[in-house]
Image (cartoon, rainbow, N blue to C red):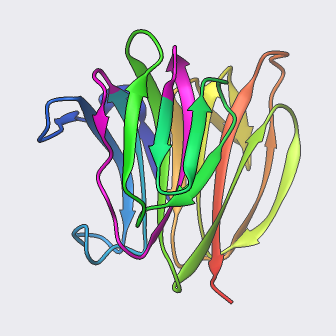
Amino acid sequence: MQRFDVDALAATPWKNGGGSTREIASWPPGAGFDGFDWRVSVASIAASGPFSRFAGVDRIITLLGGDGVRLQGEGIDHHLATPLAPFAFSGDARIDCTLLGGASSDFNVMTRRGRLRAELRVLRGAAGLAAAPHGLLLAWRGGWRAGGQPLAQGQGLWWADAATPWAVATDDPDAALLAVQWHTAT
């Protein structure tokens, strides 16, 4: 199990200058964009422009803050304007992103199709998570406890190759925790 704090992660500017990405975790370690099984990041979108394409990758994007974006392209016309409402799409699709106002930030989950299948839930209160071989928990609003470990806002943990169940809880009425679990593709 690995712990992280989003604010401590280095931001990497995009080649097109439209934003930056803070990679939280990628599996297996050291795998490049053509070799990862899964990858999770937080991105800042500062300008409209095309999304990078990732052949053979399923994506889930969740607005964390800001005015949001409109995603348009091959079979997609979606306003990502409601915070903490995940939207799934294929990384194969050619997609343009248009800001709906100012800059936005989002949570990104990418999963290699055929290897694993991702499930992303936004939890608002105590919950039990069944064992999954890979997963990531991010306390986005409020403080949480995951398996007895405290997670302050912006902190999280991830695990890989170790089927682990979790019990999560919070006392904050406005809390939100992003819970990603990867299962073997069927």
Q: Quadrant of residue 82?
A: top right
Task: Say which quadrant the C terminus sits in.
Answer: bottom right
In this rendering, the count of numbered labels is 0
Give whichever of 7, 41 is nearer the camera.
Answer: 41
The stretch in magenta equals 45-69
Image x and y of residue 20, in percent: 25, 33
Q: Is residue 51 above or below residue 101?
A: below
Q: Is residue 185 above or below residue 183?
A: below
Image x and y of residue 36, in percent: 34, 73
Q: Residue at x 56, y 79 (%)?
A: 116
Image x and y of residue 106, in percent: 48, 33
Q: Residue at x 14, y 30 (%)?
A: 17
Q: Residue at x 25, y 67 (%)?
A: 33
Q: Residue at x 43, y 41 (%)?
A: 4
Q: Quadrant of residue 43?
A: top left
Give whichever of 54, 49 is nearer the camera.
Answer: 49
Residue 42 in the figure: left or right of residue 162 = left
Q: Is residue 39 above or below residue 73?
A: below
- Which residue appears farthest toward the top when viewing the image? 102
Residue 67 in the figure: left or right of residue 144 = left
Q: Quadrant of residue 2?
A: bottom left
Image x and y of residue 185, in percent: 63, 85
Q: Is residue 159 magenta?
A: no
Q: Is residue 50 magenta?
A: yes
